[in-house]
Amino acid sequence: MSDSQKNPKVLSDKIIDLLVSNTFQKNGVNVEKAKQKLSDEQKQMLKDLVTDLTSQVNSFVKEQPSQQKKPK
């Protein structure tokens, strides 16, 4: 069994990384330069956003197995 099957969080983290890096690449964003231009307030807002999204994804992933077991 692969890591992503054992731990759904691994899969969701990989998907998020892929989507974010793909979006940055398409829009010509240099991550290192962008980090230097962010204010402390913006950095904190991004950290809060990531925390919120992570908890939402984890809740969603936890609900999925129970929904898959229900007969249709």
Image (spheres, grey):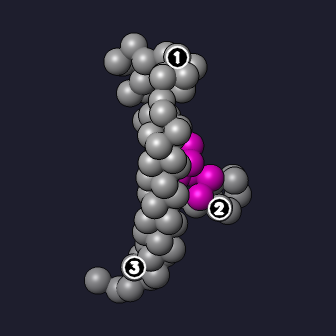
How many numbered dots are placed on residues in this image? 3
Could you say where residue 49 lies in the image, as x and y percent from the top left?
Answer: 44, 52
Q: Quadrant of residue 42?
A: top left
Can you identify the residue that label 1 sits on? 33
| Between 63 and 23, the one nearer to me in the picture | 23
Mark closer to the chain start, 1 or 3: 1
Query: Type of residue at label 3?
Result: Gln
Q: Residue at x 47, y 43 (%)?
A: 41
The secondary structure type at the circle numbered 1 is helix
Query: Residue 61, can we see it?
Result: no
Query: Type of residue at label 2?
Result: Asn
Query: Residue 8, can we see it?
Result: yes
- Give how far apart the Cα atoms at labels 2 and 3 are: 17 Å
Could you say where residue 34 lies in the image, as x and y percent from the top left?
Answer: 48, 22
Mark closer to the chain start, 1 or 2: 2
Can you identify the residue that label 3 sits on? 67
Q: Nearer the viewer, mark 1 or mark 3?
A: 1
| Between 71 and 39, the one nearer to me in the picture | 39
- Give how far apart the Cα atoms at labels 1 and 3 are: 43 Å
The secondary structure type at the circle numbered 3 is helix
Q: Is residue 71 above or below residue 18?
A: below
Query: Type of residue at label 1?
Result: Lys
* Magenta residues, start to end: 9-15
Which residue sits furthest bottom? 71
